[in-house]
Image: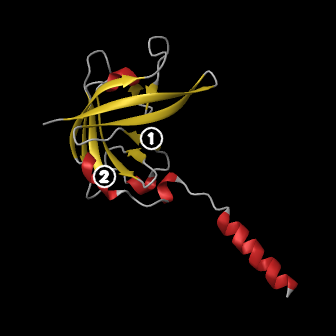
Amino acid sequence: MRKLILLMALVVLSVSCKSTSATNTKVDRKSQVAIKGNWVITSVSYPGSEYIKVNSFMIADSKCFEGSTWKFISNNDSGNMSLSKADCPSFSSPFKWFVNKEGQFVLKVLNAGEKAKRIREGYVLKLASQTEESFQLVDRIDVGGKATDVVYQFQKIK
């Protein structure tokens, strides 16, 4: 009897301690449908932006993302982004994305012909200030041992 109680306690303990990752949570369809469409990043801001450089998504300097266009397709969680700012590298890529119930935006940037399930790396950002015409993605980075928010401001293209 003791063994059975101990075994049940261990099972309950192991299930309750199970961590949940951003990718293992349910999708927030309402937030996703609201993002559907064509968007442009109007600004990228963070404290100390005049002194430090942030390499966003391992692609380019964060300021190169200002003016970039993004197309979000909510029914298959895909999209495309394109950077074309002067004095910045030209870049275009498909991506996979979704918004989970915790308000986290999960993004996987793909290479041409690459399947999302083969990519192990991705980005988890916070979805904030979402309206019909705008939203923000907030990335938390470490700058000199201090957590700093990088805010990408999106505006809907009409």
Q: Is residue 82 above or below residue 79?
A: above
Outermost residue, top side: 51
Residue 121: percent from left, percent from top: 49, 45
Residue placed at 17% from the left, 35% from the top?
A: 157
Residue placed at 48% from the left, 29% from the top?
A: 149
Where on the picture, by quarter, is residue 70?
top left
Dot 1 crowding, Cα within 10 Å, few <14, some 14–19, many 20+: many
Residue 117: percent from left, percent from top: 43, 57
Mark 2 sits on what residue?
A: 32
Q: Is residue 146 above or below residue 140?
A: above
Residue placed at 32% from the left, 24% from the top?
A: 43
Residue 13 seen from this side = yes
Element class at badge 2: helix
Q: CA distance from mark 2 to mark 1?
A: 14 Å
Q: Is residue 72 above or below residue 42?
A: below
The colour scheme applied to this rendered structure is secondary structure
Where on the picture, by quarter, is residue 5?
bottom right
Residue 68: percent from left, percent from top: 27, 29
N-term mark: 2 or 1:
2
- Label at residue 125: 1
